[in-house]
Image (cartoon, rainbow, N blue to C red):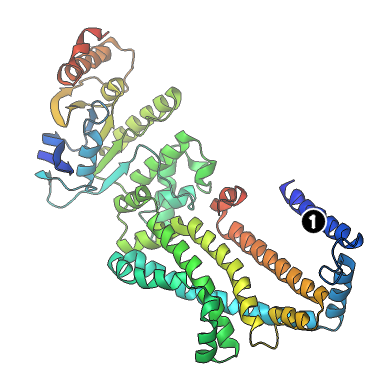
């Protein structure tokens, strides 16, 4: 179990203070798939960066079961591949010097198989499509065998078909490996399609936690899923800055 | 096609040169024709003096350029790692950078004598700053998003520097290295014009004293050709060792 208690991050511009995140309490069950949904700029990425240790909270604390920091894998919005490294070099970035060459290659090959890029170990990043590059980024995170896998709108820039296929692959990987996943998105449909729990974030505050108790694999056109989508969307519209839009929910 | 059009420019300039001298528009003493210059060049090749002067100049350039790389890269790395040291030393370095190396030549002659050390010293002074500033700029501009990836992958500070920051700084460093290569030839000729008995600069100044404009032009053309070859070799080495920069090379960004 990973827990965020009263988590907050404030920053100042000139003499004015802003809260990017305020009083967030969130429990992430071990092996669970939690999605965080909200408008652009509501603090989703900030929350993920705090969980990853890429930023220090101004308030509150993070509690990780068993004491020390868990191993963390992070998939950013963009692939962020090193252009001078091959696909295998990028995937093995965090393992070089920590494993012998044979073990490293085994782990890299396994991770590439997992994301469907077995034949591309020697390819360079500029030879990959957007979807393939994001798969490499996912393999780079998975190869670390993380306790906590954080994904920040990883499929946002992809076309609908690639996006759908990567969503399905991610769910398969999660079910096979049982890694705890936190997935950030601004797309409510994606949030309910993927997550067991959907954390709703609005203006830096956690405004709700919605359970999606549907079996996997899920169908985006399933009426039960659409009902969950509607509930989450309504809550976000009620609590967000544009709450007058409530009546436009389909 | 771009390579061909590049050679075409040389052809057009050669024709214009030929036409200017053949029509007598400019005195042959001021601008000897291409055939006269070619003849002078052939003579210098036959008696071996061109190869001797070119070899000496190449040796000086190689030494000066190599020393500049050895000095500038570690210093840029140190400054990249220690921003306080950088801000402490920056005013002094900026002051030095403004001084043309040839203005220091009289002092260098006094301090280092008129031998090889003084000539190599001028080349080092000319090449150091482009390489140093290129490397420093590259290190400072390394994409923080890639550094974040290194942090998430658990790389240490040293590993982030060697495995992410340095490769990311390569395009800016290459620009500095190429500029410095050009500067090395300028500085060399400057150094060889004064107090020298060999080298292409000496060949030029000696020919000027003997009123042999054709040999002056041979020296100038040889320096240009050697500079072009050095740059082409550098680009070729870069294409082989850093294939991910190939597209930037084609676009002329590095």
Q: Which quadrant does the N terminus of chain A fall into? A: top left
Number of dots carrying numbers: 1
Identify which residue, B170 or A112, lies in the foreground. B170
Compared to residue B185, the image places residue A82 above or below, namely: above
Compared to residue A139, the image places residue B109 above or below, namely: below
Q: Position of residue B199 (x, y in %)?
A: 70, 82
Question: Can residue B183 be seen by looking at this rendering?
Answer: yes
Q: Quadrant of residue A244?
A: top left
Please give the chain letter of the residue carrying mark 1.
B
Identify which residue, A25 or B111, lies in the foreground. B111
Compared to residue B181, the image places residue A218 above or below, namely: above
Q: Residue at x 22, y 26 (%)?
A: A196
Q: Position of residue B209 (x, y in %)?
A: 76, 83
Compared to residue A198, the image places residue A75 above or below, namely: below
Position of A14 with respect to B101 (left or right) is left
Q: Position of residue B21 (x, y in %)?
A: 87, 63
Position of A100 with respect to A84 (left or right) is left
* Mark 1, residue position: B13
> How many neighbours does mark 1 have within 10 angstroms: few (below 14), some (14-19), or many (20 or more)?
few
Identify the secondary structure beneath mark 1: helix
Q: Which quadrant does the C terminus of chain A fall into? A: top left
Identify which residue, A181 or B153, lies in the foreground. B153
């Amino acid at each position: 179990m990973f827990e965020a208690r009263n988590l907050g991050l404030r920053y100042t511009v000139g003499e004015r203070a802003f809260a990017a995140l305020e009083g967030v309490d969130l429990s992430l069950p071990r092996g669970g798939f939690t999605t965080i949904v909200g408008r652009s700029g509501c603090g989703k990425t900030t929350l993920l960066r705090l969980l990853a240790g890429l930023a220090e909270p101004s308030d509150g604390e993070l509690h990780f079961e068993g004491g020390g920091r868990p191993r963390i894998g992070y998939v950013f919005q963009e692939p962020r591949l090193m252009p001078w490294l091959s696909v295998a070099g990028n995937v093995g970035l965090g393992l070089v010097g920590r494993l012998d060459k044979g073990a490293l290659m085994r782990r890299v090959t396994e991770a590439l198989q997992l994301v469907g890029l077995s034949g591309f170990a020697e390819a360079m990043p500029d030879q990959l499509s957007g979807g393939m590059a994001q798969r490499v980024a996912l393999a780079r995170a998975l190869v670390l065998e993380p306790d906590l896998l954080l994904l920040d709108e990883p499929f946002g820039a992809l076309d609908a078909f690639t996006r759908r296929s990567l969503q399905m692959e991610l769910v398969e990987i999660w079910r096979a490996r049982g890694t705890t996943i936190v997935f950030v998105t601004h797309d409510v449909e994606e949030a309910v399609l993927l997550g067991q729990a959907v954390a709703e974030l609005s203006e830096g505050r956690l405004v709700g936690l919605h359970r999606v108790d549907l079996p996997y694999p899920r169908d985006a056109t399933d009426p039960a899923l659409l009902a969950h989508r509607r509930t989450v969307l309504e809550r976000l519209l009620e609590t967000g800055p544009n709450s007058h839009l409530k009546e436009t929910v389909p | 096609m771009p390579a061909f059009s590049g050679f075409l420019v040389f052809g057009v300039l050669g024709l214009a040169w030929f036409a200017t001298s053949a029509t007598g528009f400019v005195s042959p003493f001021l601008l000897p024709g291409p055939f006269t210059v070619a003849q002078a060049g052939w003579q210098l090749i036959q008696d071996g003096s061109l190869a001797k002067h070119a070899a000496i100049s190449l040796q000086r350039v190689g030494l000066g350029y190599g020393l500049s790389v050895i000095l500038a890269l570690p210093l840029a790395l140190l400054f990249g790692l220690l921003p306080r040291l950088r801000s402490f030393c920056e005013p002094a370095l900026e002051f030095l950078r403004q001084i043309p190396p040839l203005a220091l030549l009289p002092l260098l002659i006094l301090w280092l004598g008129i031998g090889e050390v003084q000539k190599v010293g001028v080349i080092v002074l000319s090449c150091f700053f482009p390489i140093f500033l290129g490397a420093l700029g590259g290190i400072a501009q390394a994409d923080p998003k890639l550094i974040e990836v290194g942090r998430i992958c658990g790389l240490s500070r040293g590993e982030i520097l060697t495995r992410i920051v340095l490769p990311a700084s390569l395009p800016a460093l290459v620009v500095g290295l190429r500029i410095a290569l050009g500067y090395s030839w300028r500085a060399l000729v400057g150094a060889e014009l004064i107090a020298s008995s060999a080298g292409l600069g000496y060949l030029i100044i000696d020919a000027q004293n003997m009123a042999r404009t054709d040999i002056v032009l041979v020296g100038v053309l040889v320096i240009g050709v050697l500079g072009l070859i050095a740059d082409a070799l550098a680009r070729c080495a870069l294409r082989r060792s850093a294939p991910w920069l190939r597209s930037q090379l084609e676009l002329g960004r590095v």
